[in-house]
Image: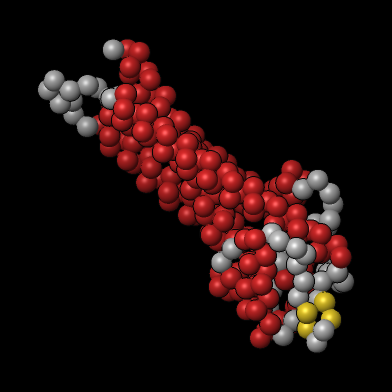
């Protein structure tokens, strides 16, 4: 009985980690590839007076950029009057960003599949709902501690978090763009990423809180007569 209870807890814990990762990567994918969202955040954080880009070009630029991030095919470019608005360094950096989105999509599918497998194993093995719920709650708490820790770091030193992410995510320094010459950094200043981080962090926090509540409720369910714990 004790072995089955331990197995139920571990399966619930692993499921919470896997589904939490699936939720995070899904949020990154859908938020980062939404042209409407990108346009709205870009207009807020980088208005035309700061970017020197006409307001009517924001929507088509964001539509083309998010399409490129989804596909990652070829080299990104945006022309105005037959002239490219982005330099070679910016294009290579955007290709690196598209590679990250492809990785995000792969992790999303893998973690979603693993979540389904773990849930199926839990059902097939007939693990106790209370132990499984305790595992889910514990896994959700681990993820919640991570998102809260990142939130505290971002509030204390967002620039430090931003730089650390880029040094881990990219194998080159092409993300160090010059606002005087590079349109990309004018379109995506720190405030732009702060807005994205707030949306992603808030969405993930809500999902994890709901996941924890589900696990906690399952763990508190009264034992049914003749049923497994």
What residue is at 56 percent from the left and 66 percent from the top? 34
- Residue extending farthest to the front is 74
- Residue extending farthest to the top is 2
Number of on-image labels: 0
Residue 63 showing in the rendered view: yes
Q: Quadrant of the N terminus?
A: top left
Q: Is residue 209 above or below residue 48?
A: above
In the image, 118: left or right of 81?
left
In the image, 3: left or right of 64?
left
User: Residue 155: where, in percent of width, then height?
Assistant: 62, 52
Q: Quadrant of the C terminus?
A: top left
Displayed quadrant of residue 124: top left
User: Residue 2: where, in percent of width, then height?
Assistant: 32, 12
Considering depth in this image, is 95 or 178 the residue closer to the camera? 95
In the image, 59: left or right of 96?
left
Residue 131 showing in the rendered view: no
Q: Is residue 89 above or below residue 117?
A: below
Considering depth in this image, is 81 or 58 the residue closer to the camera? 81
């Amino acid at each position: 009985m004790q072995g089955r209870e331990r197995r139920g807890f571990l399966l619930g814990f692993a499921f919470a980690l896997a589904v939490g990762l699936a939720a995070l990567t899904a949020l990154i994918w859908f938020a980062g590839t939404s042209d409407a969202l990108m346009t709205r955040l870009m207009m807020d954080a980088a208005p035309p007076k700061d970017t020197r880009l006409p307001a009517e070009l924001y929507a088509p630029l964001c539509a083309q950029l998010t399409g490129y991030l989804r596909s990652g095919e070829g080299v990104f470019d945006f022309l105005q009057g037959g002239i490219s608005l982005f330099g070679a360094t910016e294009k290579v950096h955007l290709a690196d960003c598209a590679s990250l989105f492809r990785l995000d999509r792969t992790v999303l599918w893998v973690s979603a599949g693993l979540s389904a497998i773990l849930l199926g194993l839990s059902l097939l093995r007939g693990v106790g709902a209370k132990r499984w719920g305790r595992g889910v709650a514990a896994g959700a708490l681990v993820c919640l501690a991570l998102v809260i820790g990142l939130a505290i770091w971002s509030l204390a030193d967002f620039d430090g978090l931003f730089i650390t992410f880029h040094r881990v995510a990219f194998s080159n320094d092409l993300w160090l763009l010059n606002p005087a010459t590079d349109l990309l950094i004018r379109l995506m200043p720190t405030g732009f990423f702060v807005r994205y981080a707030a949306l992603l962090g808030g969405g993930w926090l809500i999902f994890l809180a709901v996941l924890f509540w589900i696990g906690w409720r399952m763990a508190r369910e009264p034992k049914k007569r003749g049923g497994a714990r």
